[in-house]
Image (spheres, rainbow, N blue to C red):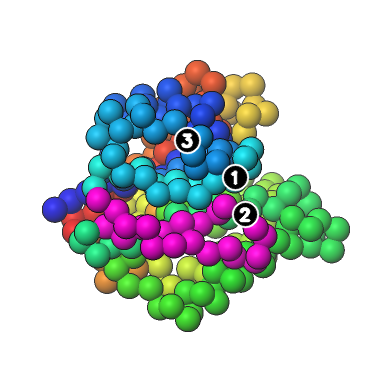
Amino acid sequence: MPFTLATWNINSVRLREPLVVRMLEEESPDVLCLQECKSPVDRIPVEKFRDLGYTHMIARGQKGYNGVAILSKLPIEDVGDRDFASLGHARHIAGRLENGVTIHNFYVPAGGDVPDREVNVKFGQKLDYLTEMRDWFHAERPEKAILVGDLNIAPREDDVWNHKQLLKIVSHTPVEVDHLGAAQDAGKWVDITRQDIPDGNLYSWWSYRSSDWDAADKGRRLDHVWATPDISNAGHGSRVLRHIRGYEKPSDHAPVLATFDL
């Protein structure tokens, strides 16, 4: 039975509850993974989500920062979280569907503005977070799993609006790309979005700093959908809901979707 999964950095689920409701009404994915919820779990506004059929939620939250949640029409079991790099942040949660598929929802640290861990603690934390992801995937050898989230790295040259200009900009530096690639390789994760859309520029984030983000189109693909090799061939129908970046008072991220025939 196929199910559709969406991932979206919402940049405050309480502030943007109407946008979440609108997206759920328009697209009706079976599972929605949110990042940067910026809310304690008990303050997430679940009532309207439940009215739309999203009667299952697992989440980790903290006031004003970080936070991850999985909203689901399908029964889903909370199978825990990990505090990668011991940051004390709500950045990971995992849930298991009744078909045995485990969904990992990640919000990787952004890393600050300076790509040098000697002068920027946040950049070092980001690299350490990715290293611990790599080591965990090596140890756990995930199977029948999907990984989604705001990974805060655009790995390919065509995942950014200008590869050469962004080589020294956090989110596209070679050291970040290498660390993300090592984590991906450790779990043998398949990039489902690029499996479906292998060629051409593709973005999921556009800065608030751009007065006309759509015309300027200086985007980056920071939001990802991966799957383990045993189920990667079941993934299809990937798309980025670019138009949602144009909603009133939007997140700077657009949702990314994929369907799995499992």
The segment highlighted magenta reads 75-97
Q: Is residue 140 magenta?
A: no
Mark 3 or mark 2, earlier in chain: 3
Give residue 158's mark.
Answer: none
- Using the rendered image of the protein, determine whether residue 34 is visible from the camera's viewpoint: yes
How far is the residue under mark 3 from the one under mark 2?
A: 17 Å
The amino acid type found where label 1 is placed reads Gln
Q: Residue at x 54, y 21 (%)?
A: 249
- Using the rendered image of the protein, determine whether residue 219 is visible from the camera's viewpoint: no
Q: Residue at x 65, y 66 (%)?
A: 85
SS at badge 2: loop
Q: From this view, report whether residue 198 is shown above or below residue 23.
A: below
The amino acid type found where label 3 is placed reads Ile
Where is residue 76? Give x, y as percent: 29, 53
Image quadrant in which you'd find residue 235: bottom left
Of 226 and 66, nearer the camera is 66
List the residue tagged with mark 1: 62
Q: Tell whether label 1 touches label 2 (CB within 8 Å).
A: yes
List the residue tagged with mark 2: 89
**Which quadrant: the C terminus?**
bottom left
How far is the residue under mark 2 from the one under mark 1?
A: 8 Å
Q: Is residue 235 left or right of residue 133?
A: left
Q: Is residue 100 left or right of residue 161?
A: left
**Dot 1: few (<14), some (14–19), or many (≥20) neighbours within 10 Å?**
many
The amino acid type found where label 2 is placed reads His
Q: Is residue 96 magenta?
A: yes
Of 165 and 129, nearer the camera is 129
Q: Residue furthest front?
A: 42
Of 63 and 102, nearer the camera is 63
Give residue 44's mark.
Answer: 3
